Image (cartoon, rainbow, N blue to C red):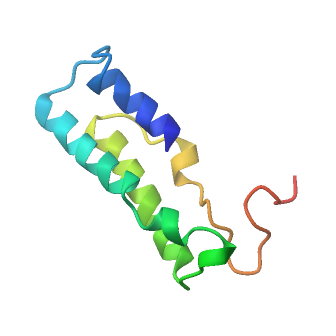
Amino acid sequence: MRKTREMLAEYDIAKARPPRWQKLAQALDFMYLAEGSDWFWWFGNDQDSGGRLVLDYSFRSLLSEVYKSLGEPVPDFVQAPVVAPEGAAPFGKWPV
C-alpha cells in the first residue's frame, strides 16, 4: 500500500503528474477505501474470519483501481496475493 500511496502522491501532493481532477478524485476514493479496509483487521493468524482470500483479493482490487483510475499500469506486486492459499506457508516464509 505504501508504494501505491507514494505513486498517488506524485499526482495529489507533488503535482509532478497533473491528472484530470475527476481521475484524481476517483483514485483518491479507491485509496481511501483501501486504507479503511477490513483487511487490516482480519489479516493475520490471530484474526481469521474464514474469508481471508476474499478480503485479500478485495484489498488488492482497490489498490489496482487506484492505478487504473490514473491510467497507470498495475504493478505486479499489487496482483500478487499477500495471504497464503490454504495449506501454503505464511507470507514471508515461502520457499525460495
Instruction: Residue at 26% x, 42% y: name it.
Output: 27
Q: Residue furthest bottom?
A: 50
Instruction: Residue at 58% x, 68% y: name it.
Output: 43
Compared to residue 68, the image places residue 95 above or below, namely: below
Residue 68, given in percent of the width and then of the height, sits at: 32, 43
Residue 44, given in percent of the width and then of the height, sits at: 64, 69
Residue 93, given in percent of the width and then of the height, sits at: 82, 59
Instruction: Residue at 44% x, 60% y: name it.
Output: 59
Quadrant of residue 90 within the rendered picture = bottom right
Instruction: Residue at 87% x, 58% y: name it.
Output: 95
Judged left or right of residue 33, residue 87 is right
Quadrant of residue 61 within the rendered picture = bottom left
Compared to residue 53, the image places residue 71 above or below, namely: above
Residue 73, given in percent of the width and then of the height, sits at: 41, 37
Q: Nearer the viewer, residue 38 or 81?
A: 38
Compared to residue 38, the image places residue 33 above or below, namely: above
Q: How many badges with numbers are in the image?
A: 0
Quadrant of residue 13 within the rendered picture = top left
Judged left or right of residue 56, residue 67 is left
Compared to residue 94, the image places residue 9 above or below, namely: above
